[in-house]
Image (cartoon, helix red, strand yellow):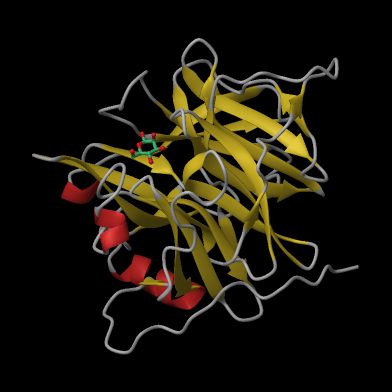
Amino acid sequence: MNKTYASIPWENKPKDLNQPVWRYSQNPIIKRYPIPNIARIFNSAVLPYNDGFVGVFRAEQHDGVPFLHVGYSKDGINWNIEEHKIRVYDEQNQLVEYRYMYDPRLVEIEGVYYSIFCTDNHGATLGLVSTKDFKTFKKISDPFLPFNRNGVLFPRRVNGKYLMLSRPSDSGHTPFGDIFISESKDMEFWGNHKFLMGKNHLWWQNVKIGGGSVPIETKEGWLIFYHGVTGTANGFVYSMGAAILDLDNPSIVKYRSRNWVLTPSEDYEEKGFVPNVIFPCSALYEKQTGRIAIYYGAADSYIGLAFTTLDEIVDYIKKYEEV
Ligand code: BMA
């Protein structure tokens, strides 16, 4: 039986806007100090769930350390975030004590929800957990050695294998970084690592790039939104890029937009804990309407929502494509 989901958030494109992605007029959708002991929520991921939406949110405590909190919403815009961090259990049913957890992505594969995020294993690397009910989470072994960030799982197996994007890093504010693609038969052991796409000569993405939203399956291929970073006299600037990967062999980049598709220009993107950051972690696609709603972290302080349609973004990527 097909599940019926709530409509994804939507607002029409403002007239006269010459850009393929437009912001929600009521941004940011999550403001500062949203719940007790949490100063900022940003870089978070959501999915349709029951008759509404569920999300795994990066929540910065008042001691400055981030953990993940579950939230629920009827409309994908107004969120009730739980006050406690997620509870993760290991194979012996012991509570796992993470030192920190941040930048989650969220995907449903074959009826199981997986969240992949950045955590510590003697250095920053990816953590992976699964859940069926968002009440308790099960730890799956860390997919990679330190240092790695920006893990993104595909929403289905391709040629029988689970697929993951990741971004090998260093221990700090990494000054380099390309996206790799890896595969697994069981979600536990990852291998066959291949370079997918890298930073390049284009100034908005000439320092590093990293995976963002769960790939959206389209007849053109897998549509991905990712972040690209440049360095300025005042530090890094994070923009959003878009590309399309081959459907049957996603290690092939079919099209990649040479232009960013969203770059910091609103107050809540330019001013905050870390200025000039647009950091997409999630994109919802509604097949019946072709609408896409993108959730992005803004200035490491807020969550912003932006929209496009499949036709519009695919046309744009092809028009300005440069692999
Ligand atoms: C990256 C990550 C993100 C953050 C970004 C900008 O390295 O730590 O969580 O949004 O920097 O500060």
Q: Position of residue 3 (x, y in %)?
A: 83, 68
- Position in image of residue 294 (x %, y %): 49, 62
Q: Residue furthest front?
A: 36
Residue 224 in sight: yes
Furthest residue in direction right, as rendered: 1
Task: Tell me: 234 left or right of 47.
Answer: left
Quadrant housing residue 270: bottom left
Taking the spot 33% from the left edge, 49% from the top edge, the residue there is 299
Report whether 138 appears left or right of 64: right
Q: Which residue is nearer to you in this view: 175 or 53? A: 53
Picture quadrant of residue 119: top right
Q: In the visual, does 199 lie left or right of 134?
A: left
Residue 322, visible in the rendered structure = no
Q: Foreground residue, 87 or 164?
A: 87
189 lies above or below 210 = above
For this orientation, the residue located farthest to the bottom is 15
> Residue 83 location, x and y as percent?
65, 43
Q: Position of residue 81 (x, y in %)?
A: 64, 51
User: Along the line of sight, which residue is nearer the eye, 72 or 187?
Assistant: 72
Q: Quadrant of ligand 1?
A: top left
As drawn, 185 above or below 147: below
* Residue pictured at 28% horizontal, 40% vertical: 199
Decide if residue 145 is on the left or right side of residue 110.
Answer: left
